[in-house]
Image (tube, rainbow, N blue to C red):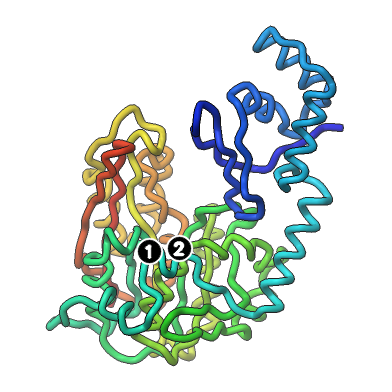
Amino acid sequence: MKPKVRALEAIPLDGGFYLRDPMGISEGLWVSEHALYLISLMDGTRSLLDIKADFLRATGYLLRDEEIKELLESLEENFLLEGPRFRERLNALKQELISKGVREPSHVGIVYPSEPEELRSFLKLEEKEETFPMLGIMAPHMDLRVAKRTYWEGYGRLRGEKKLVLILGVSHYWHEMPFSVLPVDIATPFGTLKTRKDLINKLQELYTFDITHDLLAYRQEHSIEFASLYVGMLYPRAEVLAMIVSYGELEFLKSLAENLLRLVEKELDQTLVVSGIDLSHVGQKFGDVRSYDPSFRDIEYLELIKDLKVEEAFELLQKDKNRTRIDGQYTNVVFTHFLRQAGAKEGRLFDYDKHYERETDSVVSYASVGFM
């Protein structure tokens, strides 16, 4: 037996650590520091004997078989171990969501109001005198309570009706495939946005892997949810195709953009593409010794994005392993290459801002950019 613990987040709590499940399948588990180290050895490459030996070398403590067995049983019970029990639970939750046919909002009533008119007043700020017939918009997915102005600086300048909206988000949760699509409708307080299942079927024909495989990642994904609110408010009769872009080589991502464009080119004049991304993530919360101002990198990146310099923007982040952690690096390749191939000429920066979280000495930056 070579136990393998799933990818989890370890959050310091009450002298130990809370193991958080990014997929939301488990309620999580509190463990001690030594238990966390023991769990880190359960990576699928070690037998139980190997785990005991490595733990002894690191801590000087010889584990009893009962201690390991008790921890494994707790992990298994909470669906935190890779294996048949977890996979059965995963598939059951997928089927439940597919059968329901709709993704319910996960942040309503917490981050934003549930009543349509109250939500409209919350999202929609002053009317913009200057509006544009945009093909694409890059907007934040930052907490709406923090970045509401930046959202509206972009969404508030949209002009004209749209019948189809492509929503491109990022992966904040478990994701196995380079990209995925949401095959169910999206519920918002403004009504339910219908998903273009015909486009999903056509896109699936172009790929050998299941493009809906990572369905459960959408249950709590705010980069999709927050964009859907503005779509529901501004284009309540529009249909949508929501997609998470998680990773990929440059040419693979560009080919994905070209495939999407071929699917919608006959209705391009009534299509809007949304990239729901934030920019830099720096500070102690993200692994840095201290926070700093990331605008030097953001400005350089935004200039390339505005000019639709897809390859240069991607290379800028790749060359130093994306040191300020701009989370739109993969999503924006698909977004900007789609726009460039569709004939967009340039982007216009409407707003740029940063949020400092004092408790964690951390900074997240974000912007809104429209493309015509």
Q: Residue furthest top?
A: 60
Q: Mark on residue 111?
A: 1
Residue 20: x and y in percent read 57, 44
- Residue that badge 2 annotates: 222
Image-quadrant location for residue 120: bottom left
Q: Which residue is drawn at 29% across and 56% down?
A: 366
Along the viewing direction, whichever of 300 and 350 lies nearer the viewer:
350
Q: Which residue lies furthest to the right in this view?
A: 1
Q: Residue at x 40, y 47 (%)?
A: 315
As displayed, is residue 356 above or below residue 229? above
What amino acid is labelled 2 in the image?
His
As displayed, is residue 319 above or below residue 42? below
Say few, some or many: other residues with alpha carbon within 10 Å of mark 1 (under 14 / 14 to 19 / 20 or more): few
Q: Which of marks 1 and 2 is nearer the N terminus?
A: 1
Q: Residue at x 78, y 34 (%)?
A: 72
Q: Are marks 1 and 2 in contact (CB under 8 Å)?
A: yes
Residue 261: x and y in percent read 49, 78
Q: From the viewer's perspective, is the residue at label 1 or at label 2 nearer?
A: 1
User: In the rendered image, is residue 172 in sight?
Assistant: yes
The count of marks equals: 2
Residue 212: x and y in percent read 66, 68
Along the viewing direction, whichever of 187 and 78 lies nearer the viewer:
78
> What's the distance in space between the residues labelled 1 and 2, CA to CA?
10 Å
As displayed, is residue 143 above or below residue 135? above
Residue 110: x and y in percent read 40, 63
In the drawing, does residue 315 fall left or right of residue 367? right
What amino acid is labelled 1 in the image?
Val
In the drawing, does residue 262 fall left or right of residue 340? right
Image-quadrant location for residue 272: bottom left
In the drawing, does residue 81 fall left or right of residue 170? right
User: In the rendered image, is residue 345 in sight?
Assistant: no
